[in-house]
Amino acid sequence: MQILAGNGNAKSGSAQPLQATAPKPRFYLMMAVVFAVVAVLGFAPTYWLPLARGTLKVPPITHLHALFF
């Protein structure tokens, strides 16, 4: 199935096939940054802030989990 771009008039004969554009790498980079920021901010109250204050009491495996995930 081919999607055509035109003026909406089926009889015009000037319809051109739409060209698919490749996704821009910058979009994926920016989305990765956004998701990383959301993850850090989301875990700030329960992990990062207590860790910075020295009040975080969790088993060492939790830090390993935080490192990889």
Image: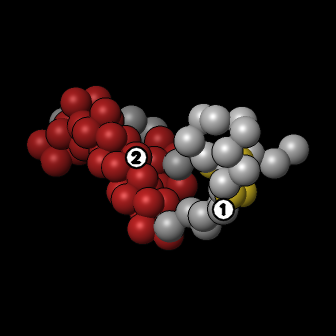
Q: Which residue is mark 1?
A: 19
Residue at the spot 39% in from the left edge and 35% down from the top edge: 58
Classify residue 29 by image quadrant.
bottom left
Q: Residues within 10 Å of mark 1 (few under 14, many from 20)?
A: few
- Name the secondary structure under disc 1: loop
> Which amino acid is tagged 2?
Phe
Q: CA distance from mark 2 to mark 1?
A: 30 Å
| Mark 2 or mark 1, earlier in chain | 1
Q: Residues within 10 Å of mark 2 (few under 14, many from 20)?
A: few
Q: Nearer the viewer, mark 2 or mark 1?
A: 1
- Disc number for residue 38: none
> Which amino acid is tagged 1?
Gln
Residue 50 seen in the figure: yes
Q: Please state which of residues 42 and 49 is positioned toward the viewer in this rendering.
A: 42
Q: Please state which of residues 31 and 3 is positioned toward the viewer in this rendering.
A: 3
Measured from the top left, where is residue 56 in percent x and y? 26, 37
Q: Please state which of residues 9 and 4 is positioned toward the viewer in this rendering.
A: 9
Q: Which residue is mark 2?
A: 35
Measured from the top left, where is residue 18 in percent x and y? 66, 56
- Residue 5 as seen in the image, left or right of residue 25: right
Residue at the spot 63% in from the left edge and 48% down from the top edge: 5
Way the structure is coloured:
secondary structure
Residue 57 seen in the figure: no
Give the quadrant of the N terminus.
top right
Measured from the top left, where is residue 21 in percent x and y? 60, 64
- Name the secondary structure under disc 2: helix
